[in-house]
Image (tube, rainbow, N blue to C red):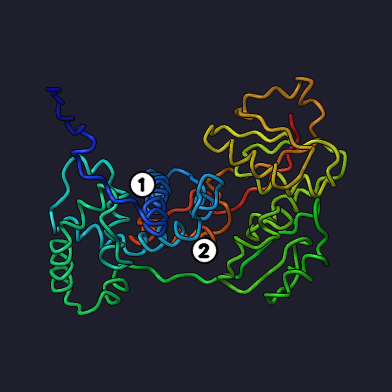
Amino acid sequence: MARFKAKQPSSGAAEKKKPRMSNAERSAYFSRREAAKVLRSVLQGDAHRRAVASIKSLVYSPSIKNKKATFALVCQTLKHLPIIKDVLEGANILNSRWKRQVELVYIITYDILFGQEISFVGEAEKFLLQRKVSLQSALARLLVRKKMKRIEDLLDHYQTPDVSKPRYVRVNTLKLDVDSALIELRKQYMVEKDDLVPDLLKLPPKCDLHDHPLVMNGSVFMQGKASSMVAAALDPEPGWEVLDACAAPGNKTVHLAALMRGKGKVIACELNKERIKRLADTVRLSGACNIEVFHSDFLSLDPKDPPYSKVRAILLDPSCSGSGTVAERLDHLLPSHAAGNYVHLCSVVIASFLSFF
């Protein structure tokens, strides 16, 4: 009589299969992690009074996939951050592991208390959802302690007023002329030319142009007026060789190339290795072919070296002077600004057309 050995179930088959994420769950899961990464950069820079790219620049970099969701999460979490910190402290639920991922904890706590309903997808989500009652209780105690009845009152208590400014965009004349850009943008928005910078257009506040075809193909750059004035003030002539000393993220660099009509040469120096890719992406998007990117400290360059001996002018706009103004950078959302300690490291945009000697 033949004997048959019973087949033992594999350990993998014995384990309960994890349910597959829906598309919405997957999108939310990755958006929260992308938002946490941006939030970490912003908060670390703010804490050390160190220059970083603006919130918008970080969110709308090529590495961020779900830009709208990530941008909304970062802004709303920053807006509610003082409340979130007080709630987490009151709930006393964070162990050392989650303290090392505190930015992700901030993002998920925002969603649990003030945002959308989230599912048990992800270890951090599961950890915090299991403690949702503790978080809600801590929020209720905070309202009582502050003698307030509504979340809106808490926000007013913690926050400084928002600043509303026009939306500015600069036409990349390497790809499109200003009049053609006006015609195209006026199909959706009220647009007028700026009275100071020739290739700059002014739109109503809070116009969202990030997904507009002209922005996506590099015909138009979202660039504040202060940022756009720098290259215009230098006003390089076609055929010049110009050094952009602190080039990333590259908006002023490609503006120089456009003013030079793609002729001559722009030497773009950037010391920060992490910002080099952003600079290269901006140059590629602009279509400029007269820009050379260098990962180097411009102060170490020798003006007598042949590659730099023909430089006619330097554009110097240190990264601390901003990717635009305080309002456009959304710096009013930062903890230092809300606490009344905000100090802009360089209050004036520096346009320097110095001799290279």
Work out whether mark 2 precedes mark 1 in sequence or the reverse, and give the earlier one: 1
Q: Is residue 184 left or right of residue 97?
A: right
Q: In this view, does 323 lie above or below 177?
A: above
Q: Which of 327 and 71 is in front in this view?
A: 71
Q: In which quarter of the image is residue 178?
A: bottom right
Q: Which of 175 and 119 is in front in this view?
A: 119
Pointer 2 and pointer 1: residues touching (CB < 8 Å)?
no
Mark 2 — residue? 327
* 3D distance between C-alphas at marks 2 and 1: 19 Å
Q: Is residue 15 above or below residue 1?
A: below
Relative image position of residue 142 (x, y in whole percent): 16, 68
Q: Is residue 212 left or right of residue 155?
A: right
Q: Which residue lies furthest to the front in this view?
A: 1
Q: Residues within 10 Å of mark 2 (few under 14, many from 20)?
A: some
Q: Quadrant of residue 302?
A: top right
Judged from the image, the secondary structure of the residue bearing numbered disc 1 is helix
| Number of residue marks | 2
